[in-house]
Amino acid sequence: MAAACIFCKIVKVIPKHHGAKLGDIPDDSLSEILPVAKKLAQLVNADDYNILQNNGRLAHQEVDHVHFHMIPKPNAQEGLGIGWPAQKTDMDKLKQLCSELKSKM
């Protein structure tokens, strides 16, 4: 692994339970995912990184098996670039949505 190669440090974490989307995986099969991703980030000395998991083609999922990417972000040019149109937040609607979601959990 070349020290300067960011692509050599992108790691996939794959649950043992097969499922195409996150909702297909039982909760108990997900409990070790973030600790493993965290440990991998530490092993490649990634101070800044993203954990990415996509669901469905519109969300850029290419492989029909749930997996998580640990993507180092060593600087502004390398790693995952994220951009979406920022919108003004209606706090009253956001609070209402939060209440509705809490009641359903």
Image (tube, grey):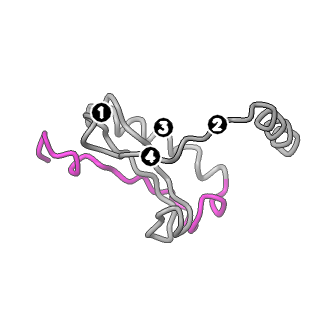
Mark 3 crowd level (few <14, some 14–19, many ≥20, 10 Å Cα): few
Tell me where residue 33 appears, x and y as whole percent.
51, 46
Q: Nearer the viewer, residue 34 or 54?
A: 54
Q: Nearer the viewer, residue 45 or 56?
A: 56
User: Bounds of the magenta span?
Assistant: 1-26
Q: Amino acid at mark 4?
A: Gly
Which residue in the protein does label 1 denote?
46
Numbered tag placed on residue 16 in the rendering: none
Which residue in the protein does label 2 denote?
88
Question: Image check: 74 left or right of 14?
Answer: left
Mark 2 crowd level (few <14, some 14–19, many ≥20, 10 Å Cα): few
The disc, 4 or 3, on the residue closer to the chain's N-terminal end is: 3
Looking at the image, the residue that sits furthest to the top is 47
The disc, 2 or 3, on the residue closer to the chain's N-terminal end is: 3
Which residue in the protein does label 3 denote?
35
As helix, strand or loop, the secondary structure at mark 3 comes to helix
The disc, 2 or 1, on the residue closer to the chain's N-terminal end is: 1
Residue drawn at x 50%, y 71% is 64
Residue drawn at x 86%, y 45% is 104
As helix, strand or loop, the secondary structure at mark 2 comes to loop
